[in-house]
Amino acid sequence: MAAKKLPSVLLRAGEDRRVRSGHPWAFSNEILMDPETKALPPGSLVILRTPGGEALGVATFNPHSLIAARLLTSNPEATIDALFFGRRLANAVALRDRLVGVPYYRLIHAEADGIPGVIIDRFGDAVVMQVNSIGMELLTPVLLEAIEAELSPRVIVLKNDSPVRELEGLKRETTIAKGELDGPIELIENDAKFVADLSGGQKTGWFYDQRDNRRFMARFAKDARVLDAYCYSGGFGVLAAKHGAKSVTCLDRSQPALDSAAKAAALNGVSDVVTFQKGEVFDTLEKLEPNGRNFDVVICDPPAFVKSRKDIKVGVQGYRKMVRLAAPLVAPGGFLFVASCSHLVEPPLFAEQVRRGLRDAGRNARILRSAGAALDHPVHPGLPETAYLKAMTLQID
């Protein structure tokens, strides 16, 4: 749609500074919600303007959402079509190919790659896309056209099952937009092979964000006894086995996840080193604790303990408990890796829970490394809060 035909949405007096400074969103209370603006169909493309009428760019607009406007471009003359998205996809592919080297990566990381509210993960000749705003939902056919032109994938999965879609008035569903899936597919990460369930697995089927952290922890694996708690499909544990671990225990409450990890162990020829245990992690760690100090490396990469602001006070205690239970299992001189993917838990708060957990466990430690998501998960400069992943590697005395 040509920009000159788009309706205008005005920011309220004094409410344009944040967008001018580089923030890609305008909230509903910052927008002049006159009757004409309120009547715009959810998902409309609009020109976002200052109170004085200066054009700030083209945005998608939803008058019923807290995040009312999401900027697509600061160019008010831009035409939002397949060519527009194709250029952004091409830039993202070139960057990821340079960073990762194999076609298995986070291809589009929402606002940071100029396609707000959209996640795209690439699995060789398969692509998984998650759309989390009504504006991009309406533009999905155009996005699919761009994906086809740039990548010509065999399979495109629309994994639109995120709870945040409901905030945009969208239903949660998973569909296949192109091709067929006859089961989990193989992927390559850190020169190892894994399997991902693109339609039925968590998120897009794999967590590329921990790629660099998995590689870092693998350096401690040689001749080590390793515990991979919340192992999911074995990203940490199987890689540790491939790097020479003496033994690896993969622990998860999900049998499908353990089955995927077992397939990965077989693909990498390390089935004789890796064992699999089904159970709730906290309960299992508690039962292991009386034996004490059984592992040289313990990895805890849990799902989000804090999913909303009302959960923060109680949820962060989960990280403290996790460290309290995990630290006693680490042999003196061994290593503990802990992570949080809860975007509402800021790094200082996470670090404080780790410190308290160590104190509760009566263990001393030193932080060797604090890290975030892998390089194919860039952060928009105007949205520093989207640096959601926190990871700490500690050596335990």
Image (cartoon, rainbow, N blue to C red):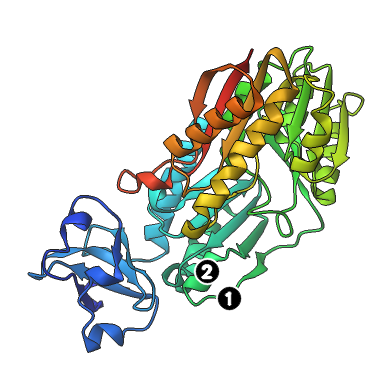
Q: Is residue 64 above or below residue 365?
A: below
- Closest to the observer, 295 or 211: 295
Q: Is residue 345 left or right of residue 268?
A: left
* Spatial CA span between label 1 and label 2: 7 Å
Find numbered disc 1 in the image and state the secondary structure of the residue it sits on.
loop
Q: Amino acid at mark 2?
A: Arg
Q: Quadrant of the C terminus?
A: top right
Query: In the picture, residue 36 is in which quadrant?
Result: bottom left
Q: Amino acid at mark 1?
A: Lys
x, y percentage for residue 225? 80, 19
As drawn, the label of residue 165 is 2
> Is the Cβ of the residue at disc 1 closer than 8 Å to that at disc 2?
yes
x, y percentage for residue 45? 32, 73
Find numbered disc 2 in the image and state the secondary structure of the residue it sits on.
helix
Residue plotted at (40% across, 42% down): 379
Q: Which residue is mark 1?
A: 171
Q: Quadrant of the N terminus?
A: bottom left
Is residue 100 something one can see in this rendering?
no
How many other residues sit within 10 Å of disc 1, few (<14), some (14-19) or many (≥20)? some
Residue plotted at (43% across, 42% down): 346
x, y percentage for residue 72? 33, 60
Give the mark nearer the N terminus: 1 vs 2.
Answer: 2
